[in-house]
Image: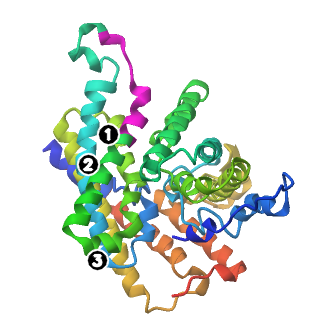
Amino acid sequence: MSTENTTAQVVKKEKEPLFSAKRRKLITDPLNDNNPVTVQVLGICSALAITVQVKPSLFMFGGVLFVVTLGNVIVSLIRNLIPSRVRIIAQLVIVAALVIIVDLILKAYAYDMSKQLSVFVGLIITNCIVMGRLEAFAMGNKWWPSLLDGIGNALGYGLILVLVATAREIFGSGTFLGYQVIPQALYDVGYVNNGLMILPPMALIVVGIIIWIQRARNTKLIEAN
Amino acid sequence: MELVNIFVKSIFVENMIFAYFLGMCSYLAVSKKVKTALGLGMAVIFVLGLTVPINYILENYLLKEGALTWLSPDFKSVDLSFLSFLMFIAVVAAFVQLVEMAVEKFSPSLYASLGIFLPLIAVNCSILGGALFMQQRDYPSLAHATVFGLGSGIGWMMAIVFIAAIREKIRYSHIPAPLRGLGIAFILTGLMGIAFMSFMGIKL
C-alpha cells in the first residue's frame, strides 16, 4: 500500500506558526491527493458497509474523527515511551479504549444508531485508517501536527463516506437524510428506485466509479500496469 | 445439521468480503498473485478458526452479564461486557504473533512474500469482525462458534483467491487508465458480490 510516501513528512525543528502552509496541507492533502480511502486504500471495510444511508455514515464519521484524532495525539505524546517491539499492541489498547468510549456514548445518547451500526462501531478498532495513521504519522511527529493529520484523514474518510452514502440513498431510496428529494411527479411518470443500490455490492462499484473520476482528473495517481 | 447450515451460510451467503466488506484492506493489497493470496487466506482461516472459539469462551465465562457465576454466585450481577473490545483485540493480537512465528519457522518463503501483511492480520477487520458477530448472534454452543469461525475464514480465502486469479488475467486486457489497479479491483469485487448474492436464501 502507499503508506510509505507519507512517512517522509518530517516536521522542522524551528518554531512554526500554528497554521503554516505545510500544516494546512496536512488537513487538505487527505481530502484529495492523499485520500485515505481512494489513494492509501485504508479503512474500506467500514466505509462500505454502513453507506446505505447518509445518517449512519455521518455518525460513523464522527466516531472515526474522535478516535483517530485523539489516538494520534495520545500516541504522539507517549511515542518515546513505547518500546518498538510491542508498539502494535500498545496502539491497539489505546484505540480500543477510545472505541469503547464511542460505543458507550452512542449506546447512551443514540441507541437506534448504535443498533444500526451494530458491529461496525467495534470495528473502528481495526479500521486501517486509525492504525495506519498511528503507525505512519503519530509515531514520528509531535502532537500538534498529529492532531491536524488525524482531523485531515478523518475528513478525507468522511468525504468519501458521505459521497457514497448520498449516491446510494438518492438512487436507492429517493431520499436524503430521510427526506424525500425525488419528487412524486417523477414516480408518477414511471420512475422507479434502483433497488440494486441498497444491496452491498453496489457500494464497491460506487467507490470504483469515484476512484475513476478522481484519477481521471488527477492523472498523477494513475497506477502503472 | 444446524452446524452444516452455519458453515455453508458463513462461506457463501454471509461471506465476510461480499456481504460485510470485512478485511478489504489486505484483500485489495495482497491479491496481485494467487500464491500469496492463498498463503494469506490460510493464515486467516487458522486465526479465525482459533480466535472465535477462544473469544466465545471468554465471552461466556468472563464477560457476559452473569457469566462469572461459576466462580461464586455472588458475581451474578457483574457485567464486564464493556471490556469485550479490549479482550477480543488482545486475543487476536497475541494469536497473530503466534502465527507469525510459526510461519517464519516453517515456511520462510511464504513469510518473505507476505511481508508486512502478516502482522496486519491483527488489524484485519474480518478477524475482529468474526468475534463481534459471534457475540452479537449469541451462538448456543462452542461448536457453533468454531464452525462459524472456520466457515468465515474459508469464505474469506475463497474470495481473495478468486480476485487474485482474475487480477492475474486482467493484467493483459485494456482497462481505461484511471481505472487500472484499484478501481477495477473494486468494480470486480462488486460484480462478484452480485454473483454471490444468488446464494441468498439457501436453506439446508
Q: Main secondary structure of the magenta part?
A: helix
Q: Which residue is mark 2?
A: B149
Q: Dot 1: what SS?
A: helix
Label 1 – label 3 distance at C-alpha: 30 Å
Q: Chain of mark 2?
A: B
The one nearer the camera, A95 or A164, is A95
Label 3 – label 2 distance at C-alpha: 23 Å
Q: Residues within 10 Å of mark 2 (few under 14, many from 20)?
A: many
Q: Dot 2: what SS?
A: helix
Q: Chain of mark 1?
A: B
Q: Which label is found at residue B134? A: 1
The one nearer the camera, A151 or A191, is A151
For the point 68% across and 83% down, which residue is it? A219
Tell me, yes or no, whether the highlighted magenta stretch contains residue B45.
no
Q: Which residue is mark 3?
A: B35
Q: How is the image coloured?
A: rainbow
Q: Magenta segment, which residues?
A: B75-89
For the point 50% across and 70% down, which residue is it? B186
Q: Dot 3: what SS?
A: helix
